[in-house]
Amino acid sequence: MSDINPRRAHELGMGRPISRRDFFDGVAMAAGVAALGAAAGCGPSSGEPGVIGTPELQVPTDVKFPPTLTGLQGNTPQALSVPHALRDDRFWEYAGTPEFTGENYDLVVVGGGISGVSAAFEWLRTNPGGRILILDNHDEIGGHARRNEFTPQARKGPLIGYGGSQSIEAPSVWTPEGKNLLQQLSVKVEKFEKYFDQKLYTNLKMYDSVMCDRETFPVERLVKYTPGIKAEEWIAQLPVAEQAKKDLLRLYKNPPDWFPGMPQAEKERRLADLTYSRFLLEVCKVHPDAELFLRTQSSDEWAYSTQAFGAIDAWGSAEEWEYPGFQGLKLDAGKPSKFNSPSMIKEWDADDAYIYHFPEGNQALVRMMVGRMIPGFASATDMDGITTASFDYGKLDLPSNRVRFRLSSPVVTASNDGDPDTATTATVGYFDGHQIRTVRAGAVVMACWNMVIPYLVPSLPPAQKQAMHQAVKMPLLYAMVQLRNWEAWRKVGINHTRWTGAYWCVSELDYPVSMPGYECPKDPSQPINVHMIATPCVSAMGPSEGAIAGRHNLLKTDFSFFEYTIRDQLARLLGAGGFDPGKDIEAITVNRWGHGYAPEYCRPWNAFYPEGPFPAETARRRHGRIAIANSDSIPAAYADAAITAAHRAVAELST
């Protein structure tokens, strides 16, 4: 891209060898539907070394374990080419005649993420003798719940990170279906109170921080939130206008009642009609630098900035220092507003620490379920053994399995066999990289994105299709950067940084969680993973329109830009600690989720909320022998939401 400075790129070490960097370039891999052959030994009958890449770029590889793949992962061109061809009406012209495989299943699940695998797991629980096929367009199980794994030379054993669904967030208020699944898997979340070292970084005098970056302000400056620091002290360090400093201090220390004499209900309604940025600029009338400083506060959690984040949810956020300015309103913090988003209402009284996290994130839950359904896939399926277990992807799709998991197999059609009101079976077609193959199913669960389902099930009623198209997912990038050590982080005295306007909005050392047989890095001389987050949404356009614009930009961005910006930002952040991106960065995995977070209903963008009616209720209606799962159908971007959607879909098909 034009934003890459060749001289700067050389200084950052772009020319030095790095794990599989060039081969996984996002542009080089975009070769269309012909690229969808089985990859990394993950095809239907795999178990032997395979090939990765387009026909022009096929390179032999002995990689059999997708988490070890670096470079561009997630929604890769291979995974998206068929869905995009269907969307653009380019697929069927060249697809050829479907061929029936002769396979018959009790259930076919479309989508192998948390929701899809949970649907299969629940179906098998209620129908122990059932035969199930799970189909997914990616080369890995778990969907957005993806594991990233590195093998540093200076470490005994792998270094494991997460490339998607992070944590069991607020387990005390998980849905009943989510809690039941954890119980079935014998996941005792209280163990994380021992496994997660909550004092590791603070004991090393490493703290949270904000980088007032050169993309936002004339002078770039890192400001640390050291223990006991007063607002006056850190605000004085900010490279913002003097009036902005005064305005920020007022917001944090003594904001007035911006709506004097107004009843609480009306105050809440006024906040519901504003974004947090508009609240700051139009109501609080702060200097523009103050709004710019706070703009990315919401980015990592919501995948959009405060230009889209609602003021009512900013008020309702647990940490007042994150979104200052509301204390003077004297709103009752003992209960949420009806205008708060559903997840905020759900977690209002939850006080769970953010520690319930497997090293690989929630893919651990997926691996436990798959391991219990498919013999021989996992050497261990319990909480304490799943992270260090061995996995045989060659076992996923054996004809002898009651449950089969078929990767790199994008579904292209799902239809009832006859009238939806009377049909007893359905047919599902997928593309195996060469032609369309079909299977027969007694029931089908669509656990893929709502946005794609109308192209796969064209017989859906128009109102249902329209409702599905309203579920516009938020684009998201999760990068895992494996460093040879983290001495520079310790010297600078930080473990987490929010950027005010650079491409990556968060840079942080990985969560310090150890499991039996796996120890997180505890000495700064050891290799470690750095987690970086980018949120491409053009927030000023609003969540939906901004997500579409951001996704279009994201899909045109190649891996070299991601690598350049990662190296550049880490060099700027850690240069004072002696960080050398050319030597210290040993591997990079960028997990691209063009279709990332499920969109949650929120104000001010969804005028129908909270009264309804809600598009998701129309979108998730059963269509004959086809039921709808996925987090879009709730909608909420949380693991327990995906699980609950799966249980509902299975229950609908069982009646």
Image (cartoon, helix red, strand yellow):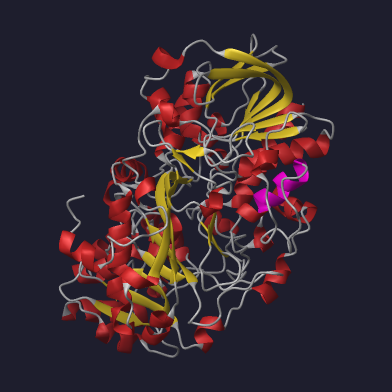
Q: Position of residue 167 (x, y in %)?
A: 58, 60
Residue 345: name its quadrant: bottom right
Q: Is residue 344 left or right of residue 81?
A: right
Q: Is residue 370 magenta?
A: yes
Residue nearest the viewer, comparing 557 with 609: 557
> Quick one: quadrant of the C terminus?
top right
Give, as a single range, the part of the protein colored magenta.
Answer: 365-374
631 lies above or below 493: above
Is 321 situated above or below 7? Answer: below
Q: How many marks?
A: 0
Q: Depth check: give the residue in front, 98 or 582.
A: 582
Magenta stretch, main secondary structure class: helix
When asked about the image quadrant of residue 213, the answer is bottom left
Q: Is residue 595 placed above or below 457 in the rendered structure?
A: below
Residue under the point 80% across and 30% down = 130
Q: Is residue 421 magenta?
A: no
Q: Position of residue 570 (x, y in %)?
A: 33, 70
Q: Is residue 369 visible?
A: yes
Q: Nearer the viewer, residue 593 or 500?
A: 593
Q: Is residue 141 above or below residue 19?
A: above
The answer to whether one can see residue 284 in this image is no
Query: In the image, 155: left or right of 399?
Result: left
State the image coordinates of residue 221 (x, y, percent, origin top left): 25, 79
Residue at 30 percent of width and 40 percent of height? 552
**x, y percentage for residue 93?**
39, 13
